[in-house]
């Protein structure tokens, strides 16, 4: 079969790749091929909690997440109103050193126009009648934070892209991907496409893909877990999401009165091809202990299911979005450090502007803090680090 021609090929159909295809199509960049050996949502996207928060650590992230939120709200209103809800997000601590960091974070966020503020324990109790907040010395929350159903949003992006002619090659293994002359050539399922530009948006799988091309970037895949539980009585759908900063357990409301709970990063690198996809007993026990201590009314909650997904960490906790160093026509959209759902829409829109604009350099400026070329020639090693931190805001690049 004769090779096909495309303007760009996107590797990966998680929320990032689908959002990028959607934005490229919206800018009339095409033809576009999106390739994934599985299906949209098969990676971290289909396993994510879907919390979308503006309580972040630098202005760039806040702006990108706000752009995602506005887009998720509009797309969900049009295609599936159950996929997005504004419910707020609160966090609290009993530890003095964390309380200080939380206070600094609230000040910073206020300076960036985020409607985050400190909360009293009475206010916490009003939000969470199931909660027990004795010993809590600091809390904060943002009423504008939201929850999204990540796999639904990826599907909405994919359908929108498809409606504008994007060709999805799904469910077949990758036979070959390499540079041939001036073009990036991808072969799968007996078809071959040549494109002048290629974007690696393959989540945790991006590390190996880039290394196999001879363009490695510092990415460390790591495992993180979540579970759905059914408290009795069930929780209201507008319950704010919450993060107990001391146990690192977070919760969000799910449909039918259930809650989704998760905890932090595992600090060891895993292989996304072979990681254990089920939830560990130790994780489930940690959630149960946190519930018994902080949410006594949920202590008897029934475990519906627990699972793990794999995300990709970077040495500075910031994503890699833009040109791959010393690889003409190759771009990356990965390394979200566990925050890729909330960043995907805004980040994809900025990268699509680079790929679809006559003035790519100007558009690249909007990606400067996350430009992968900051790691050109990088040879170090690192372990996955928790993506969520209360620190930040002091780096002038952001
Ligand atoms: C338990 C858990 C909770 C989370 N909670 C949140 C949250 O509340 N908020 C938030 O913002 N983020 C959250 N995340 C993180 C979020 O899921 C990810 O950052 C996000 O989904 C990354 O999207 P992606 O499209 O980059 O990657 P993925 O969704 O992993 O997609 C990558 C795709 O690449 C494909 N692929 C593999 N190999 C190849 C290849 N050779 N060529 C092409 N494609 C390939 C895979 O099949 C997959 O479909 C959570 C993650 C987990 C696991």
Image: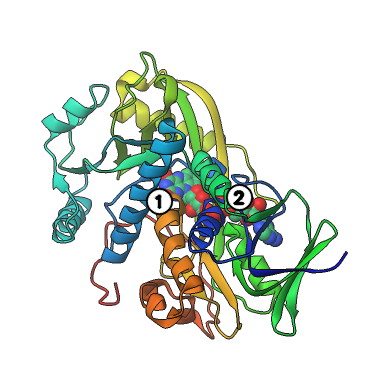
How many angstroms separate mark 1 from mark 2 (CA)? 22 Å
Looking at the image, the residue that sits furthest to the right is 1
Q: How crowded is mark 2: few (under 14 residues within 10 Å), some or many (20 or more)?
A: some
Coordinates of residue 350 in the picture (x, y in percent): 42, 66
Q: Residue 373 carries which label?
A: none
Coordinates of residue 215 in the picture (x, y in percent): 63, 78
Coordinates of residue 157 in the picture (x, y in percent): 52, 48
- In-front residue for pair 75/325: 75
Where's the N terminus, which quadrant?
A: bottom right
Identify which residue is drawn at 51% across, 70% down.
382
Question: For the residue with label 2, is its CB less than 8 Å from the closest atom of ligand 1?
Answer: no
Task: Tell me the SS state at disc 1.
Answer: helix
Query: Which residue is identified by label 2?
Result: 162
The relative height of residue 264 versus residue 8 in the rendered view (above or below) is above
Where's the C terminus, which quadrant?
A: bottom left
Identify which residue is drawn at 45% across, 50% down.
341
Q: Which mark is residue 342?
A: 1
- In-front residue for pair 117/144: 144
Asked if residue 338 lies left or right of residue 237, the reply is: right
Question: For the residue with label 1, is its CB less than 8 Å from the closest atom of ligand 1?
Answer: yes
CB contact under 8 Å: marks 1 and 2:
no
Q: Which label lies toward us, 1 or 2? A: 2
Q: How crowded is mark 1: few (under 14 residues within 10 Å), some or many (20 or more)?
A: many
Looking at the image, the residue that sits furthest to the top is 233
Q: Quadrant of residue 130?
A: top left
Identify which residue is drawn at 61% across, 64% down.
206
Asked if residue 132 lies left or right of residue 357, the reply is: left
Residue 311 visible in image: no
Mark found first going from the N terminus, 1 or 2: 2
């Amino acid at each position: 079969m004769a090779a096909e021609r495309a303007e760009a090929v996107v590797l990966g159909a998680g929320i990032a790749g689908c959002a990028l295809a959607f934005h490229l199509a919206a800018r009339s960049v095409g033809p576009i091929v999106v390739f994934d050996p599985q299906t949209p949502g098969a990676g971290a996207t289909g396993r994510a909690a879907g919390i979308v928060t503006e309580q972040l650590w630098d202005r760039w992230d806040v702006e990108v997440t706000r752009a995602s939120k506005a887009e998720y709200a509009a797309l969900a209103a049009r295609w599936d109103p159950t996929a997005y809800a504004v419910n707020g997000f609160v966090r609290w601590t009993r530890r003095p050193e964390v309380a200080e960091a939380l206070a600094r974070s609230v000040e910073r966020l206020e300076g960036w126009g985020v409607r985050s503020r400190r909360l009293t324990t009475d206010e916490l109790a009003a939000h969470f009648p199931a909660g027990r907040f004795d010993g809590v010395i600091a809390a904060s929350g943002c009423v504008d934070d939201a929850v999204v159903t990540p796999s639904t949003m990826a599907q909405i992006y994919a359908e929108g892209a498809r409606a504008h002619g994007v060709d999805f090659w799904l469910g077949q293994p990758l036979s070959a991907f390499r540079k041939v002359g001036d073009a990036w050539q991808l072969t799968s399922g007996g078809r071959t496409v040549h494109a002048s530009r290629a974007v690696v948006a393959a989540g945790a799988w991006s590390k190996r893909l880039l290394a196999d091309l001879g363009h490695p970037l510092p990415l460390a895949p790591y495992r993180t877990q979540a579970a759905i539980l059914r408290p009795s009585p069930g929780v209201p759908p507008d319950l704010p999401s919450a993060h107990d900063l001391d146990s690192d357990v977070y919760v969000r409301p799910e449909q039918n009165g259930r809650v989704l709970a998760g905890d932090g990063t595992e600090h060891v690198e895993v292989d996304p091809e072979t990681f254990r996809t089920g939830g560990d007993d130790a994780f489930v026990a940690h959630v149960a202990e946190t519930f018994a201590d902080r949410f006594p009314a949920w202590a008897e909650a029934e475990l519906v299911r627990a699972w793990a997904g794999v995300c990709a960490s970077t040495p500075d906790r910031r994503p890699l979005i833009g040109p791959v160093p010393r690889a003409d026509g190759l771009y990356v959209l990965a390394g979200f450090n566990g925050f890729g759902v909330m960043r995907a829409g805004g980040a994809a829109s900025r990268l699509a502007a680079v790929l679809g604009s006559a003035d790519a350099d100007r558009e690249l400026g909007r990606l400067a803090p996350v430009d992968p070329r900051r790691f050109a020639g990088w040879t170090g090693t690192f372990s996955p680090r928790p993506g969520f931190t209360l620190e930040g805001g002091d780096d002038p690049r952001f």
